């Protein structure tokens, strides 16, 4: 099984909003790292609990914008929403024997384009941002 297949299943299980089911694709020694906040979560149970406890306005949806990978690694660009909150995550997965062993995730914040380069760029509308 290729890493892309495992990560596709990861996002499918996340979309169920039954986060304990995600443990099916996580290795026993799974580690999640968020470099921006310098946080690390060890184990599928803590990962599931963190997602269950995260404040939400409704059910979470996950739209894969892009997913690339090889046999042992995959990278996904996913748009996430609970109907009110919207975010985008860039996630790097390591996969061994069909299980995710490590996930390093970045949550970039959108920002307004600086005016000093307006003469060089064209603005994209929301439908083009994928």
Image (cartoon, grey):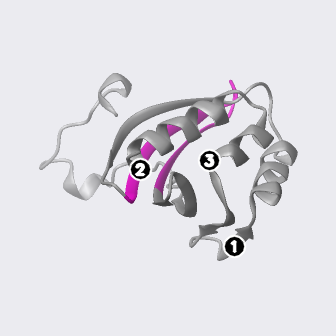
Sequence order check: which comes first, mark 2 or mark 3?
2
The relative height of residue 31 versus residue 80 in the rendered view (above or below) is below
Residue closest to the far left: 120
Q: Secondary structure at mark 3?
A: helix
Mark 1: few, some, or many residues within 10 Å (few <14, many ≥20)? few
Confirm whether the magenta stretch covers residue 89.
Answer: yes
Kindly identify which residue carries mark 1.
39
Q: Identify the image quadrant of the C terminus.
A: top left
Of tags 1 and 3, which is closer to the observer?
Answer: 3
Picture residue at 64% right of the left edge, 54% below the top: 26
Q: Identify the image quadrant of the N terminus.
A: top left
Name the spot of residue 27 as percent of width and height, x first.
Answer: 64, 60
Q: Secondary structure at mark 1?
A: strand
Kindly identify which residue carries mark 3.
25
Name the spot of residue 53 as percent of width and height, x first.
Answer: 87, 47
Picture residue at 68% right of the left edge, 44% below the top: 24
| Dominant secondary structure (helix, strand or loop) of the stretch shown in magenta | strand
Of tags 2 and 1, which is closer to the observer?
Answer: 2
């Amino acid at each position: 099984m290729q890493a892309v297949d495992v990560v596709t299943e990861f996002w499918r299980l996340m979309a169920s909003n039954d986060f304990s089911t995600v443990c099916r694709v996580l290795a026993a020694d799974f580690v999640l790292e968020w470099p921006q906040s310098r946080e690390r979560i060890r184990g599928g149970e803590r990962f599931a609990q963190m997602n269950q406890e995260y404040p939400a306005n409704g059910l979470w949806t996950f739209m894969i914008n892009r997913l690339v990978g090889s046999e042992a690694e995959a990278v996904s660009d996913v748009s996430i929403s609970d109907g009110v909150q919207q975010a985008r995550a860039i996630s790097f997965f390591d996969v061994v024997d069909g299980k995710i062993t490590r996930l390093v995730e970045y949550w970039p914040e959108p920002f307004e384009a600086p005016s000093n380069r307006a003469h060089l760029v064209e603005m994209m509308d929301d439908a083009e941002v994928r």
